Image (cartoon, grey):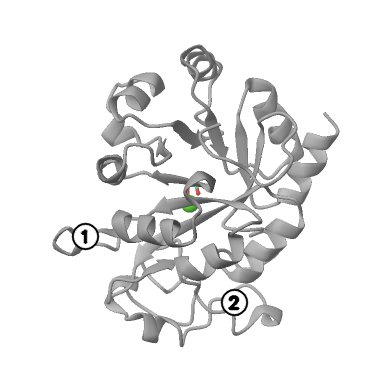
């Protein structure tokens, strides 16, 4: 594995809470991350973009509309503005008032407990305002001394290239993205970008790709798998880890294999 785990990992297979335990708590909030940890996830996945004032914040969409009480682009709001929003009440009344976390807040929680997959989202970060999102995230990882426990990833391969330029030892996974990938196979992509892992949807993880990855010796992490049947299928196929909104279900399956 390109990343260390705090848990006493049995077999190198990683249970990843997708946006936290997002089937049960509002995605990408502290309560979702806490729940994933308590359910036995070994890694949490989260989505990071920049606020208007350049602070790495944890939210999936380019806009605020779906998961918060705000509207418009995340990057048009300062951290102070983002912090007034409610990122929980869209999910349930019980979670009303849950704030958008900063990456720093999540790392502070995760240190010593759980590894983190930081997915860099660049849709909201316009070209002229790229503002070094990878550098900022990496500075925070260093501040919390979590270098060995972080796996970066992105659908935007420029972000992978930036990370490797900052430090070639930063663990980074390519998220399969058809357009940028062209006709390149997973191993051609991983090699081409000097990446440490390959992440793809369960719909894309074919037997052919599984064979290629195992021969080339890089891990494949598969998203987003919430049914027991598909979890079993992907494990059998050779996934090195699974992103699930239900890490508790995945844990039970992994323990009873
Ligand atoms: O990183 C795996 C997965 O989270 C990628 O898709 O849309 O859920 O960010 P998305
Ligand atoms: Ca994601």
As drawn, the label of residue 172 is: none
How packed is label 2: few (under 14 Cα within 10 Å), some, or many (20 or more)? Answer: many
Question: Which residue lies most toward the right here?
Answer: 256
In-front residue for pair 83/62: 83
Q: Residue at x 59, y 59 (%)?
A: 111
Q: Residue at x 31, y 42 (%)?
A: 167
Query: Is disc 2 in contact with disc 1, using a CB cutoff of under 8 Å?
Result: no
Q: Is residue 78 left or right of residue 208?
A: left
How packed is label 1: few (under 14 Cα within 10 Å), some, or many (20 or more)? Answer: few
Q: Residue at x 75, y 59 (%)?
A: 38
Question: Which residue lies most toward the left here?
Answer: 128
- Name the quarter where the C terminus is drawn: top right
Q: Which residue is mark 1?
A: 130
Tell me the distance, in whole angstroms, between the alpha carbons under discs 2 and 1: 28 Å
Q: Quadrant of residue 234?
A: top right
- Name the quarter where the N terminus is drawn: top right
- Which numbered mark, 2 or 1, is in the foreground of this view? 1
Q: Is residue 138 left or right of residue 99?
A: left
**Residue 143 percent across, percent down from the top left:** 43, 62
Q: Is residue 92 above or below residue 97?
A: above
Q: Residue at x 74, y 40 (%)?
A: 8
Q: Which residue is mark 2?
A: 88
For marks 2 and 1, the one nearer the N-term is 2
Q: Is residue 138 above or below residue 196?
A: below
In-front residue for pair 251/148: 148
Q: Is residue 62 visible?
A: no
Asked which secondary structure carries label 1, the reply is: loop
**Residue 60 percent across, percent down from the top left:** 45, 61
**Residue 112 percent across, percent down from the top left:** 63, 56
Q: Is residue 245 above or below residue 221?
A: below
Q: Is residue 17 left or right of residue 158?
A: right
């Amino acid at each position: 594995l390109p990343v260390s785990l705090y848990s006493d990992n049995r077999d190198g297979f990683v249970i990843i809470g997708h946006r936290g335990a997002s089937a049960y708590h509002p995605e990408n909030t502290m309560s979702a991350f806490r729940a994933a940890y308590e359910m036995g996830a070994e890694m949490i996945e989260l989505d990071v973009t920049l606020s208007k004032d350049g602070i790495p914040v944890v939210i999936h969409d380019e806009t605020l509309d779906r998961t918060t009480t705000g509207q418009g682009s995340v990057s048009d709001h300062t951290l102070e503005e983002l912090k007034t929003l409610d990122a929980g009440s869209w999910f349930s009344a019980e979670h009303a008032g849950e704030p958008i976390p900063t990456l720093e807040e999540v790392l502070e929680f995760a240190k010593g407990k759980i590894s983190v997959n930081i997915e860099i989202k660049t849709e909201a970060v316009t070209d002229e305002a790229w503002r070094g999102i990878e550098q900022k995230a990496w500075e925070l990882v260093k501040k919390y001394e979590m270098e060995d426990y972080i796996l970066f990833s992105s659908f935007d391969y420029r972000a992978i290239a930036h990370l490797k330029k900052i430090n070639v030892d930063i663990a980074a996974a390519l998220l399969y993205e058809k357009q940028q990938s062209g006709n390149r196979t997973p191993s051609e992509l991983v090699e081409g970008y000097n990446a440490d892992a390959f992440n793809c949807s369960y719909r894309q993880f074919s037997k052919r790709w599984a064979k290629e990855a195992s021969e080339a010796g890089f891990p494949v992490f598969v998203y987003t798998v919430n049914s027991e049947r598909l979890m079993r299928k992907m494990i059998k196929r050779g996934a090195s880890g699974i992103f699930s909104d239900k890490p508790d279900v995945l844990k039970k399956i992994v323990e009873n294999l």
